[in-house]
C-alpha cells in the first residue's frame, strides 16, 4: 500500500516545517489529491492515523480535497476536463492531450498551535 509511504512523507514534511517555523502540535492537515493520481483517500485516512502516532501530528484532522483531472489539447488549443489518464479530448476525440491537473498531491494547509 503506497499510501503508507505517502503519509510518512507528509508527516516528515510537517516535521521539517515545524523545525523551520517553530510550531508545536498540528490540529489539521489539508491535502489536495488529484483524482487521476491513483491515491485512495480512504487508505490515506487510515494510514495517516497510523503513521502520525507518537508525532506532533497525532490526532490531527486530515482533510482531503480532490482535484479534478484536466489537460491541454494540442489539437483544440484549449484546456479540457479529463476523466482518465491518456484519455481523449472530449471536444475533438483525439488523444494529443497533455495532463495539467489531476495527478498531484499537495500539502495545502496546516492548522497548528
Image: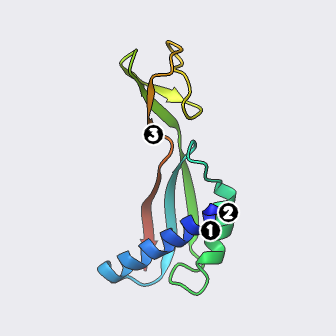
In this picture, is 85 found above or below 112? above
Q: Count neighbours of disc 3 (C-alpha within 10 A) and say few if under 14, some if 14 to 19, many if 20 or more.
A: some
Give the residue displayed 46% in from the left and 75% down from the top: 12
> Picture coordinates of residue 81 (x, y %)?
51, 28
The residue at which mark 2 appears reads as 1
Q: Please name which of the two marks, 3 or 1, marks the residue nearer to the observer.
A: 1
Residue 112 visible in this rendered orientation of the protein = no
In this picture, is 53 found above or below 41? below
> Picture coordinates of residue 106 (x, y %)?
45, 56
Give the residue displayed 61% in from the left and 53% down from the top: 39
**Which residue ends up furthest to the left in the rendered image?**
20
The residue at which mark 1 appears reads as 4
Marks 2/1: CA–CA distance: 6 Å
Marks 2/3: CA–CA distance: 23 Å
**Which residue ends up furthest to the top in the rendered image?**
92
Q: Count neighbours of disc 2 (C-alpha within 10 A) and say few if under 14, some if 14 to 19, many if 20 or more.
A: few
Q: Please name which of the two marks, 2 or 3, marks the residue nearer to the observer.
A: 2
Q: Secondary structure at mark 1?
A: helix
CB contact under 8 Å: marks 2 and 3:
no
Ranked by sequence position, the earlier of labels 2 and 3 is 2
The residue at which mark 3 appears reads as 101
Q: Which residue occupies the foreground of this view, 63 or 20? A: 20
Q: Count neighbours of disc 1 (C-alpha within 10 A) and say few if under 14, some if 14 to 19, many if 20 or more.
A: some
Marks 3/1: CA–CA distance: 23 Å
Q: Secondary structure at mark 3?
A: strand
In this picture, is 70 found above or below 30? above
Amino acid at each position: 500500500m503506497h499510501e503508507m509511504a505517502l503519509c510518512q512523507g507528509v508527516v516528515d514534511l510537517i516535521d521539517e516545517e515545524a523545525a523551520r517555523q517553530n510550531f508545536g502540535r498540528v490540529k489539521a492537515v489539508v491535502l489536495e489529491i488529484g483524482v487521476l493520481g491513483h491515491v485512495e483517500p480512504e487508505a490515506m485516512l487510515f494510514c495517516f492515523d497510523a503513521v502520525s502516532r507518537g508525532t506532533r501530528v497525532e490526532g490531527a484532522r486530515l482533510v482531503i480535497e480532490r482535484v479534478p483531472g484536466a489537460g491541454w489539447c494540442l489539437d483544440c488549443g484549449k484546456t479540457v476536463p479529463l476523466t482518465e489518464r491518456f484519455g481523449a479530448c472530449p471536444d475533438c476525440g483525439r488523444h494529443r492531450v497533455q495532463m495539467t491537473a489531476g495527478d498531484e498531491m499537495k500539502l495545502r494547509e496546516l492548522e497548528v498551535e
